[in-house]
Image: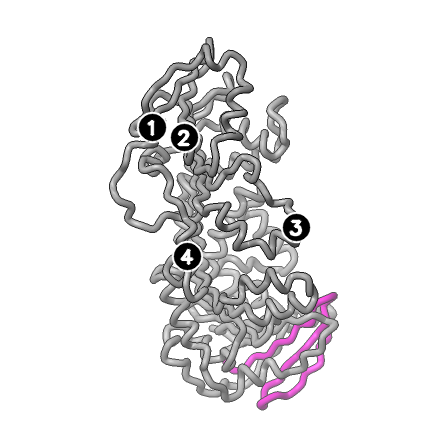
Amino acid sequence: MLAVLAMGCGGHASQAVAPPAATASFPAARWVPARPAYVFASRTVDDAQRSLRDVIDALGTLTGYDLADVTGALTGLLGVDPLHPDPLAAIGVDPHGSWAMFSEQLSPTIVVHLSAPDRMAAFLDKQRQRGVVAQPVTVDTTQVFSVTLGPVALSWAIDGDWMWLHFARASRDEGTGWFTASHGAHGAEWTGNWSWAQQAAGATAGLVGFFEPHGAIAGVLARLPDAVACAKLVEPVARIAVAVDGDGHHVGARIAVDVGSTAGVRSMVLAPPGGWDAAATGAAIAAQWNLDLSAARSWLAPCLAMVQGRFAIGDAAAIRTARGMLRSFDPDTATGTGAIALDIASPAFLEHQLDRIPLRRSLESARSFGPYKGFSIDIPFSVTVDYVLAPKIALAALGDGLLVKLVTPGPPRASPVPIAAFDVMPSAMSVQAWEFIVHAVVDQSISGSPGPVTKRLVEHLMRWRDAHFTVTAEPTELVFTASGNRT
């Protein structure tokens, strides 16, 4: 979308090129060359802007920068707001028209429909009056301009009511082959991947795309020969689909990685306790990792060897999977309610840690929690901790009845057990509680007052009703999904 604002020059009426049948609702796709490495498109510029605005707003919770910050910076740099339809319409871009971004290698080409080419020409003339000088080359009777802006080489062309923009490294002379591949006659071998990406994206996606990673992987291998064994693990990746949707209240993103078969990964996923989903409902934070680490470690051995065991977390503790939830927290007393659930290979390490608790034997009492025998540790003038330590599982909870709820079987799952999941419900805790937790994470301290960065992050966080991230293994795809709903 930012590229729409680059300098350019008008042309003549464009030739009639029909879009492939599989992309009929994406008119800009007619200009995608025969074998692109990636393609991203939306039905309208407005759809893409709305999706991008929602993504920026969502990322603002993590970065501390909101949409107004980004819009202000881009407007100051480009002279127009590229994230809202009216400013772009004012310079001739059709907010209801199609657009697409693609490349035969990595350098992107963007094609956008113009509603008023004369207004775009006037905008571009204004840029040239500021000292931008470009030399034209005629290709297919269309003038293609190029200019070097620092490390970036920018090329552009306008043919009738379509505008092309191409970005490349200034140190690499790509000529005009990119325009010939798009503007000239070409096939559409890529539409099979496009149909798959649309199906993976779902009907509501405002922006859809796919990426074939093999060229990128080969480039990495050429620079990192020691990574050959590790990179072989991703050789099954045939294509990647990306989708973003948003409507001002909801935002979602989905990445599907086609690996042919996920049977091996699915065999390493261990289900959480039967009552986990019910117990985690309404929790401020709930996280789970269900991929068996002991099984995955041997599968990932070539990659782990590169980091010399720095990611051997859980070895000594014999932890296979880990889940945790925080339901409530009182920053004044530093107490709350929550639970953890671990699959383990051996209880020896955790038993040793329990033995280090002073007077544990005199403070704990035996209890049963569903099918498990465990204990409650009643700490004087403080909290009561319920726990179970069995040969293959370890459970602990703060909160009356929470551990029982954790092990009480719920209804059958409607979806596959996720490889990993992270869910946040900001309204489940007070602003003060979130500031305490974010302060502890960001500043790595629980003393002192939260700083301005922490306060701003929490302010962004409280604008959301909920947020979710999951990684699941479908029969042929690994799927990464992120979504959120504003208050």
Please, what secondary structure does the residue beneath circle 2 have? loop
Residue 87 seen in render: yes
How much space separates mark 3 and mark 2, taking CA atoms? 33 Å
Q: Is residue 353 above or below residue 378?
A: below
How much space separates mark 4 and mark 1, taking CA atoms? 44 Å
How much space separates mark 4 and mark 2, taking CA atoms? 44 Å
User: Which span of residues is magenta-colored?
Assistant: 132-160
How much space separates mark 1 and mark 2, taking CA atoms? 8 Å
Quarter location, residue 265: bottom left
| Residue 144 sits inside the magenta stretch | yes
Tell me the mark number nearer the camera, choosing from 4 and 2: 2
Viewer-nearest residue: 351 or 7: 351
Which label is found at residue 245? 4
- Residue carrying label 3: 307
Which label is found at residue 372? 1
* Proximity of marks 1 and 2: CB atoms separated by less than 8 Å: yes
Q: Is residue 287 above or below residue 350?
A: below
Image coordinates of residue 293 in percent, x first then y, are 50, 45
- Residue carrying label 2: 390
- The amino acid at mark 1 is Tyr
Please, what secondary structure does the residue beneath circle 1 have? strand
- The amino acid at mark 2 is Ala
Badge 3 or badge 1: first in the primary sequence: 3
How much space separates mark 3 and mark 1, taking CA atoms? 39 Å
Residue at the spot x=26%, y=44% of the render?
A: 412
Viewer-nearest residue: 480 or 96: 480
- The amino acid at mark 3 is Val
Tell me the mark number nearer the camera, choosing from 4 and 1: 1
